[in-house]
Amino acid sequence: MTLMGCPAEQAARDRRFFRFFASKPKVRWAGLQRLVIYNGSTQLLLERPELRRLSFLIPPAELAGRWVPQMAIGLNPATGSTGESFRDPALVVITPGSLSYSGCGGARFSFRYTRVGGFTDVTEHGKADCGSDFASATLIRILRSNPRVERDAGGLALTVGEYAISLEPEAEVRRREAQVTPSAEFSQGERPS
């Protein structure tokens, strides 16, 4: 268990997890892709990443749309992870076979979407210039490298190797912004509190 404080729900989950492994559970294969760890009352099912990933595939019709990049993450086993939010409110627009990004001076790509949830045969049209913007440069690096595409909390993730980008549907981002941004219009005599 971690020594630093964490929310009560996470601490309870950690206790259950450690109690489970302290019970000396048994292990068995469930086919070639799954491993079951069990102790008589509880079982933990582990799946190979490729099999698990198939559960998070996005059909092409759901992939098409307007997406707002939220976070760029670089993972390094030796030094940990680096993450950065997108500075400018840029937009990714995906249509069948093409993607445009409004950041980095505008970037356009064509691609083929595979049955296993990835972009392949990616071609960049023009050359994006992101300068020192880590988040946007990471998005372009991922797009140039035939990324995998999968569901993420609230949207989708584009991943390749140790890099990942999370995107949310533009409509959801705008809805959330509208809830937070107070209206600039007030009726006669009304003042914000």
Image (cartoon, rainbow, N blue to C red):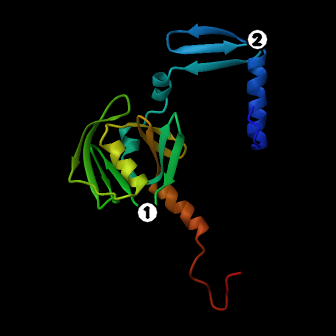
Residue 111 versus residue 191 in the image, above or below: above
The 10 Å Cα crowd at callout 2, few under 14, some 14 to 19, many 20 or more, is few
Residue 193 versus residue 112 in the image, above or below: below
Amino acid of disc 1: Pro
Q: Which residue lies furthest to the left in this view?
A: 126
Compared across the picture, whether 186 is left or right of 67 comes to: right
Residue 70 at least partly seen = yes
Q: Distance between the residues labelled 2 and 1?
A: 51 Å
Quarter of the image where the C terminus is located: bottom right
Residue 74 versus residue 34 in the image, above or below: below
Label 2, secondary structure: give it.
Answer: loop
Q: Nearer the viewer, mark 2 or mark 1?
A: 1
Amino acid of disc 2: Gly
Q: What residue do we see at 41% from left, 43% from top? A: 62
Question: What number is the disc on residue 158?
Answer: none
Residue 139's x, y, as percent? 38, 48
For label 2, the residue is 40
Quarter of the image where the N terminus is located: top right
Question: What number is the disc on residue 89?
Answer: 1
Residue 131 versus residue 119 in the image, above or below: below
Taking depth in this image into account, of 131 and 111 the one nearest to the observer is 131
Residue 99's x, y, as percent? 30, 49
Compared across the picture, whether 174 is left or right of 159 comes to: right
Q: What residue do we see at 52% from left, 34% from top? A: 78
Compared across the picture, whether 3 is left or right of 94 comes to: right
Q: What residue do we see at 51% from left, 58% from top? A: 173
Label 1, secondary structure: give it.
Answer: loop
